[in-house]
Amino acid sequence: MQTKPTLAQRAQHLPFSPIRKLVPLADAAKARGIEVLHFNIGQPDVAAPKEALDRVQQSHMDLLPYGDSQGPLSYRKKLCDYYQNHGVHLTPEDILVTTGASEALSFTINTICDPDDEIIIPEPFYANYNGFASAASARVVPVVSKFENGFELPPLELIENHIGPKTKAILLCNPNNPTGYLYREDEIRTLGAMAQKYNIFLIVDEVYREFIYEGGSHFSVLAEEEWAQNAIMIDSVSKRFSMCGARVGCLVSRNHEFLNLTLKLAQFRLSPPTYALMASEAALDAPASYLEDVRQEYARRRATAIEHFGAIAGVEISIPKGAFYSIMKLPVADAEDFSKFLLTDFNLDGTTLMLAPANGFYSNLSLGRNQIRFAFVLNSEKIIKGAAIMKAALQSYQAQES
């Protein structure tokens, strides 16, 4: 009898992505000739900056050499100029370029956490945070934010009550994925002071800082010098410049002991990808009008989603103040089952939707069971079409349930 080698418990306990778990069903629907509108994933359909694509197309390189593990100095200098425009004063030595924000988060957690150390995260949160923590044998300590109040930051005393001897960090995404909540300056300042008081890190994923609505403003975790040694910022070109496939991000901190230790992990993977770095550096040469036009486009899509999905009977929408996501509460008991139904048993004139069930964005899978994360990354015409599909699908699904 053949036997199999034993695999690591850590790997077996890693969660699958709720954003991608229904991909086989979507692929099967497409194989049947069904058009699938992807509102499940933050993949913008806005064009990347021409400067970025031209730089790669005109490179004419004879080979692709290794680069600096920390990232090219020229790119880090240009990032400093970009952050300067956002009121954050940095030097190139404060920046380590990574293979996407995902690697930046993975590096960060592996650098600051020993096995069984804890990271406090308001939930719902970007599902991969759970995976990054599990891969580092660290533990997520959730503090629940609620649909009813727009997923605003839980009471600060509640967060403070979760800080214990194993706590290494508080982790936020600002503006938030998946809720679209924008953390206020006073909230970031209070959390920064809390991190300093308890000698822990405040990690803020700021990849959506350009996409803020209703006159709001973004306050960076690095804007305040007082807690500089406690602050770590995560960033990426993926959403800002519609370059998700480039896989170029960075982690930024004035804590150089942290960065020097993280550089060891960066050296293990040698260097970020050469062509992607070229495109990312060139993207910073795009005129300011590029990002302003993109922000206005997402504002239109946001308004369209709120108007048309909000008009569906029984659907409730959490109004996003930033990023390009919203949590929607559906009139169903199990949003994941409904999401599967859309891909396996329903289409409207040959088109259906792919959604991201929101329970995967909670550490407790019993929460968010009737919620989805909706990404308004497709154009307004497709959003309107998606609302019509959702309305018809809910009627069909509810009739099937009754």
Image: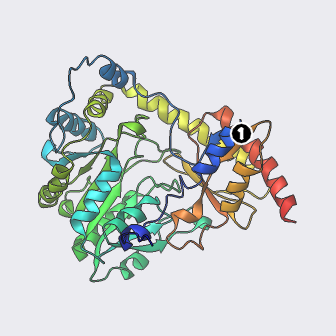
Q: Residue at x 22, y 33 (%)?
A: 78
- Location of residue 142 in the rendering, given as x and y in whole percent from the top left corner: 44, 73
Q: Is residue 196 above or below residue 344?
A: below
- Location of residue 257 in the rendering, given as x and y in whole percent from the top left corner: 11, 60
Q: Residue at x 24, y 33 (%)?
A: 274
Quadrant in which the C terminus is drawn: bottom right
Task: Left or right? Give the position of 350 relative to 354.
Answer: right
Between residues 248 and 167, which one lies in front from this camera angle? 248
- Location of residue 391 in the rendering, given as x and y in whole percent from the top left corner: 79, 48
Q: Residue at x 33, y 79 (%)?
A: 163
Q: Write down the residue under mark 1.
A: 32
Q: Is residue 356 above or below residue 304?
A: below
Residue 284 occupies quadrant:
top left
Between residues 302 and 364, which one lies in front from this camera angle? 364
Task: Left or right? Give the position of 36 relative to 166.
Answer: right
- Residue 352 visible in rendering: yes
Q: Amino acid at mark 1?
A: Arg
Q: For mark 1, give the secondary structure.
A: loop
